[in-house]
Structure formats: structure tokens, C-alpha cells
Amino acid sequence: MDDTAHGITTGAVARRLGVSPTTVRSWERRYGIGPAVRADGRHRRWSPADVAMLEEMCRLTASGVPPAEAARAAREVRKAAEVRSPAVPEGSAATAGPAAGEAVAEPATPPAEPLRGPARSARAGSGLPLGDVRQECRGLARAAVRLDGPLMEAMLRAALATYGLVATWEEIMTPTLHAVGRKWESSGDRYVEVEHLLSWHISTALRRAAVTGPSVASPGPPTLLACVPSEQHTLPLEALAAGLAEQALPTSMFGAAVPAEALDAAVRRSGPAAVVLWSQARSTADHALARHIAGTTFGVRGARTAPVVLLAGPGWRGRALAPGTARPGGLREAIGLISGLYGEPSSGNDGERAGGAGA
């Protein structure tokens, strides 16, 4: 028997969409976007028009459109699909409206256009303290709270392709990460799993962006990227690595909690143009280490040089800059400073600099 002639089950449509069956049932219960036809009057069977409606629901909620608004637009997609293919399976209990207990469809409104303009206030749905953010942040937050990995991956891919690395990091990834962190801090041990899954997918997206950059790096010494000892937050460095890869600049990523001795050895062995030290909190900022690295020289006698040390992250704030160091104000400024060292056009402001920090 060909089950597709009478529509597919909720489990099958959920697998096709990459969401859980619970999500599909929740949308049906809350927003009245259940199947137009039910086999035997009870069992849910989703027709091609119903599936098209749910696909539109997924697309709109992923872009940050509130679910109720997305549902109204999605129902219009089903109406259009039914006009193109009006046939109804024989022997089924067709109903023109939602079943008893379901939400009544509201007048349709056109789907929201993808955002690239002003930020909008977050609405209920994600449960996270987002504040004034882009719609994409709300969509990413909803997917994170639902632990919907495939949807997060698709959203991050789309954002990077549409807006580029810097805008996606500063305006979508970072605000969502901060909101999850604030929720975690205010909720005890809740939402830890949300932060871990969101961080993983952002890291995956950043690393994918890094490896899809130009295959041949510009000649010259590398830029070393490292977290100071005791610092575990690597995502900002991963974003910087991806931004430098876009410009084909050579980098060496050492990751989290690099011991001081290991960092010193890496600097002496590779002779980098710059060393980026990330510190998330003042408790991890090692100013003595930064001064030591900035004073480390290498090269032939009579022409020895030292790297520029970029103090990245909020942990470095509140202290005067040592000679040979610079403090970029964000990802864009860090890329601009490093690009200037290689003779590339700067893509941002120069941030704060101490003497000797120039190329």
C-alpha cells in the first residue's frame, strides 16, 4: 500500500523537516496549522500542501519571525498549494478549518522580509533575555532552547552567506551567546545544555568558514592566537581565525589555556608578526606574560624584531597598555590591525595602541 497517497505521518514529516515530532504537534496545537485532512477522522496525515506549509513555518521561525506570525503566513502557502493541487484523498474526513480545540486561523499577513535593517525588540518565544536584537538572533535563540541542532546549523550557514563573518559574529552569534549566558547565570544550573550546544554549532560554523577561505595564505610570519593560562573561552579567537583566513593571512591557533612556557616557545620558534592573547575576565589577564611576549625578539643579529601583542577580550580593560601592545575594540578592529601588519587594507579602526605597536 502506498501511504503517500493518503499523506505521511507526523514522524515522517518531522524527519523530513529536521525537527522533532513534538515541535510539529506543538505548532498544530498552538497555531492551528494541523493537516487539512485526517485519515479515519483521527490520525494525522500530512499532504504535500501540508508539508509545504510546515516547511514555510520552519523557514520563517528560523529567520526570527514570531511563531504566530509565521503560522499565519504558512497557512497561506498551504492555500496556494491546494489551489495548484486541489485533489483530496478519497474516503478521508476532509475539513476546511482546524479541528475542535485547535486555534482558529487569523487573517493572513505577508511573511516578514529578511532583516538587515534596524534591530527589533525580542518577543516571547525563546525565553532568553535578548533585548533589542535582529530577528535572526530570536530565531537562533528559539532553535537553541529547543536543542534543534540542524536548525541552528542551517541558520548559521545562511547568516554567514548573507551577511559575512564580522556582521554575523557581532550582530547574531555574540548577542545570542550573551543571552544564553545571562539566562544560565540567573537560572542556577539550567540552560547549561543550551549554551554547550549553541557554542558547539557556532564553533563548527566558524571553523567551516575558516577552512573555506582562500587555500593559499599570504607569505610571511604567522599570527599566533592563544588564550592566556587558565582561560577556556576560545570562540572569539575562532572568529578571528576565520576572519584572517578570509583575507588569506597566515595564522596559528593554539586554543584554550596555553601555558606560559609553551607560548614563549611557540613565539621563539615561529617568529610571528603578531600574538593575540585572549582573556575573558580580569582574573585570567596576565599582564606580566603580555609584557614578556611583547619584549621577545627573534631574527638575525642586527635585525631582530618583536611581535605586536594584541590584548583581546574584556579581561584586559582598566590597565595602561605596555609598550608593544595594542587593545582592539572588537573583531573588526583586530582584523584591521593585523591586516595592516601584512600590508593589507585595514577593515576597521586601529583600537588603542601603546608605543611600538605599529607595523
Image (tube, rainbow, N blue to C red):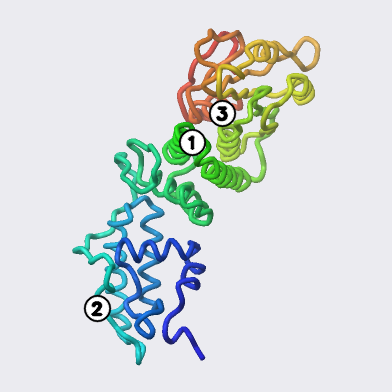
Residue identifier under label 2: 96
Which residue sits at x=66%, y=38%? 217
Residue 161 at least partly seen: no
Q: Quadrant of residue 38?
A: bottom left
Which residue sits at x=52%, y=52%? 153
Query: Residue 227 at x, y = what percent?
Result: 64, 26
Which residue sits at x=66%, y=24%? 230
Q: Amino acid at mark 2?
A: Ala
Query: Residue 246 at x, y = what percent?
Result: 57, 40
Residue 252 in the figure: left or right of residue 112: right
Residue 304 in the figure: left or right of residue 164: right
Of residue 16 and residue 298, the one placed in the foreground of this image is 16
Instruction: Find the distance from the CA under tag 3 to the CA under tag 2.
Output: 61 Å
Residue identifier under label 3: 339
Which residue sits at x=40%, y=60%? 58
Instruction: Find the distance from the CA under tag 3 to the CA under tag 1.
Output: 36 Å
Task: Give the number of the disc on residue 230.
Answer: none
Residue 349 drawn above or below residue 253? above
Of residue 245 and residue 18, the one placed in the foreground of this image is 18
Q: Residues within 10 Å of mark 1 (few under 14, many from 20)?
A: some
Residue 143 in the figure: left or right of residue 233: left
Task: Give the number of the disc on residue 184.
Answer: 1
- Mark 1, secondary structure of its residue: helix
Q: Amino acid at mark 1?
A: Trp
Question: Dots 3 and 2: beta carbons under 8 Å?
Answer: no
- Mark 3, secondary structure of its residue: helix
Which of labels 3 and 2 is toward the front?
A: 2
Instruction: Find the distance from the CA under tag 2 to the CA under tag 1.
Output: 44 Å
Question: Dots 3 and 1: beta carbons under 8 Å?
Answer: no
